[in-house]
Image (tube, rainbow, N blue to C red):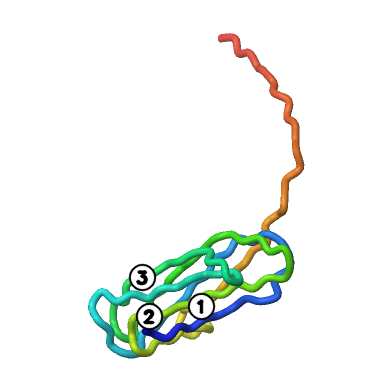
Amino acid sequence: MYNALQISLTGLPEGTYSITATAAIKPLTTFEPNAVAECVLSAGTTNIDYAETPLVKQERVVTVTAAGTVTFTGTGTLTLTCTAEAEKFELIGGSTSGYKTTITAVKVREGHPATTETATTTTFTP
């Protein structure tokens, strides 16, 4: 069993959101061949997306990106939970290394008004 680390985006108002979450994972110890880093993006108890990527080298950062949409009927929270098949690892934050662990939620317009367009015909005579 490996430890999990997570970040959350809380206090999102009611609405529909397009979400992209990226984890920058840095293993701090050695790991077995074919080891992976994996993340689950969730809203409450609902999993939105799962993503994984192979670990390549000790202390080499890998990124895992999960994405999806969610609709909150009240205030909502998004959580990105990650683990790596290494004894110790960290989620990289800030921008000093060029890597960031983030959750981005963009509120989507709820609907589009109905429109009617008139078709026109143009005849070309050679």
Q: In the rendered view of the protein, which quadrant contains the C terminus?
A: top right
Quick check: 84 left or right of 15?
A: left
Residue at disc 1, secondary structure: loop
Instruction: Tell me which amino acid carries mark 3.
Output: Thr
Q: Residues within 10 Å of mark 2 (few under 14, many from 20)?
A: many
Q: Residue furthest top?
A: 125
Tell me the distance, in whole angstroms, between the alpha carbons under discs 3 and 2.
Answer: 10 Å
94 or 47, which is in the foreground?
47
Residue at disc 2, secondary structure: strand
Q: Nearer the viewer, mark 3 or mark 1?
A: 3
Instruction: Tell me which amino acid carries mark 1.
Output: Thr
Q: Are marks 3 and 2 in contact (CB under 8 Å)?
A: no
Question: What residue is disc 1 on?
Answer: 101
Tell me the distance, in whole angstroms, between the alpha carbons under discs 1 and 2.
Answer: 14 Å
Q: Earlier in the sequence, mark 1 or mark 2?
A: 2
Q: Residue at x 59, y 59 (%)?
A: 69
Q: Picture quarter containing residue 114?
A: top right
Quick check: 46 left or right of 110?
A: left
Q: Residues within 10 Å of mark 1 (few under 14, many from 20)?
A: many
Residue 56 in the image: state x and y as whole percent. Answer: 29, 77
Question: What residue is disc 2 on?
Answer: 84
Give residue 91's mark. Answer: none
111 or 116, which is in the foreground?
111
Question: What residue is disc 3 on?
Answer: 53
Q: Are marks 1 and 2 in contact (CB under 8 Å)?
A: no
